Amino acid sequence: MENNNYENLYKPETPVSEQFTPPPAMPVPEVPPKPEIKYSNIERISAFLCMILGFLFIRFVFYHETGLFTTIFYWLFTTLEVIFVKKSDNQFSKGSKFMIAVLYLFSCVFTITANVLLKNLTVIFLILVSGLFLLGINSNLNNVLKFLPESIPLIGIAMPFAESNKCFGAINSSHKSKGLWKNLGYILGGLAIALPLTALVATLLCQSDENMSALLGKFLKIPPENMLLLAFHALLGIPVGFLIFSSFYSSTHHSVILNSETCEQKAIARRFIPNMILYTAVTPICILYILYIISQINYFMGGFMGILAEGYTYAEYARKGFFELCIVCCINFLVITSIHTYAKITDSENSKKPLALKIYSIYLCFCSLFLSSTAIAKMILYIQYYGMTRLRIYTTWFMILLVIGFVLIIIQQFIKKLNAGKIAFITFTIMFGLLCFSKPDAFITRYNANQYLSGNLENFDNSMLRDLSLDAWGALSYYTSEELEKLSINLTTRKEILQDDFYQELNLSAWEILYHVK
């Protein structure tokens, strides 16, 4: 009996399964699959070609001296850019067609001139124009040029990095395809692995055996010691290719867009300085200009009339006046742009400028025009007596560009809807084209040589030629042996130096020397 009671005492009244019912399972939310990006055929082709363009950019823009190969590179780059945009169902406006023409035309600068400064500036200019062209595809091109301060950061930062991973995605999508695309992806992947490894092995073999070095040097036309460098350039070209493809892709998929309304709001927000502060700050400068011009009127007018001021040599007269006036004009340009950028406006909705702001701007522009034209006249007088140099040409060109800028500011005060950015871009393109295609070094040398041979210059500065590019020597190759003897020029030595570097021969000036000098 006791055992039964003991069992009944610990016997559960209800089954365990009914006593501990598990709670219902919580529904697991379904994670939607990540949408797969589908790349078009033109995007796959461009992804591969951008890798090649990245290598060519490192090789023929940064490493070797720019020349014919650089021109070919930019032609290929522009052609791929245009085809990519066209195949993405985009239409070209008149402004876009103008930029395409500019890209093709200025690509020739690397072949036409040997001036390193101009070629480096052309590289920057082509990158800028190419970015403006792409940004204008998904944004209004007129707005892109109107808001250049906002457009340039988008070109230099946003577009190259916004879709930088898409190049790899487009290449990687090729293996999912069949036939040609799949095999092409495998081939390029294998080449990417084989190139640095092959270059390393070839370099080691060439260092171990001279016959192998000579054989590979003749076969590849590349010095064996540079093969490893070639592989390094290929590796550097990969991120460059990614940035190029990102710019292409973001322009056609509207990843980076210039919002004109946002730009207008930013422009209004920058106008926070009370006008009276700006007027008070500028007024003393305006009074100073009046006193300065009156006190120096005879000194200034000497440049226009070709008369040397008393107590000055031509060198002192031009140097002292010219470069000081250049600095003053640059300061004026900064002052005018600053008051237009930061001064408050009476009607923010219609962007109506106060009358006093217009008067101050026009007055400063006219003072600057007087000073600029005086400086240019003085420099012309100086050149007539002492010849041309790079510095004199470049500063005179810059002063003419400033004069055009001041005229543009004056016109803008009367035409409210004038797209100053668009006109400034076109003007700078024309002026920069004149500078590049005129071959300043050749023009300087030809002018000085002709003036000396005709007796208008006392001497011909041969030492100046050491600082000039091959353009100067190419211009001298057209002179007779008697004229070269008077100028004390030996082109045979220059030809021998030129033949030692293959990449220096890839421009028009080098061809002139090689053809004319026997």
Image (cartoon, rainbow, N blue to C red):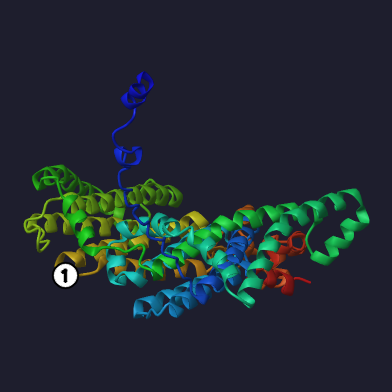
> Which residue was labeled with disc 1?
415
Whether residue 54 is visible, yes or no, is yes
In the current view of this chain or complex, which residue is farthest to the top?
A: 2
Q: Quadrant of the C terminus?
A: bottom right
Q: Position of residue 465 (x, y in %)?
A: 63, 57
In the current view of this chain or complex, which residue is farthest to the front?
A: 1
Q: Amino acid at mark 1?
A: Ile
Q: Position of residue 350 (x, y in %)?
A: 10, 64
Residue 340 quadrant: bottom left
Residue nearest the observer in this picture, 476 or 94: 94
Left or right relative to 422: residue 130 = right
Left or right relative to 467: residue 212 = right
Q: Position of residue 313 (x, y in %)?
A: 43, 49
Q: Quadrant of the N terminus?
A: top left
Residue nearest the observer in this picture, 410 or 131: 131
Left or right relative to 130: residue 498 = right
Q: Position of residue 85 (x, y in %)?
A: 44, 75
